[in-house]
Amino acid sequence: MKKITTVVAMLAVTAFAGAAFAAGPATMDLPASLGKVAFPHAKHQELVKQDCTKCHAKGPGKIAELGKDWAHKTCKGCHTEMKKGPVGCKDCHKK
């Protein structure tokens, strides 16, 4: 019984550590004319209380449909709804 508890605890720590490392800041590469969009992942996680499905439909991992249309609908839509965060072009797209 002690071995099972230890194994379960080790798996939980490993899963938590993996999520913590994945939560670092990300910068999305866009065409040079648009500049880069900085995305502070950890800050967003804190704001949505770790509910990854707010952005990741299937839970943590890459967002397959990530692109201009998706980002404008999802990111800008959430910022507008929460009345928090950038919604103007130059607020996100730094040249």
Image (cartoon, helix red, strand yellow):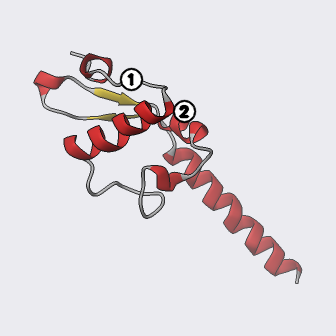
What is the secondary structure assignment of the residue under circle 1?
A: loop
Q: Seen from this angle, which residue lies furthest bottom? A: 1
* Residue at the (26%, 47%) spot, across then down: 70
Residue annotated with mark 2: 43
Quadrant of the snapshot with the C terminus:
top left
Question: What residue is rendered at 54% in x and 33% in y?
Answer: 43
Q: CA distance from mark 2 to mark 1?
A: 14 Å
Residue 80 sits above or below residue 53 on the image = above
The residue sitting at the right extreme is 2
Q: Amino acid at mark 2?
A: Lys
Residue at 50% x, 33% y: name it.
82
Q: Position of residue 58 (x, y in %)?
A: 43, 64
Q: Is residue 70 above or below residue 90?
A: below
Residue located at (60% from left, 48% from top)? 50
Residue 23 vs 83, above or below: the answer is below
Residue hosting label 1: 86
The answer to whether 45 appears left or right of 35 in the picture is right
Residue 19 placement (x, y as % from top left)? 56, 52
Say what amino acid the circle numbered 1 marks: Pro
Task: For label 2, count other residues whose C-alpha is less than 10 Å away and answer few (under 14), some (14-19) or many (20+).
Answer: few
Residue 31: percent from left, percent from top: 13, 31
- Above/below status of 74 relative to 86: below
Mark positioned earlier in the residue sequence (2 or 1): 2
Question: Which element type, helix, strand or loop, lies under badge 2?
Answer: helix
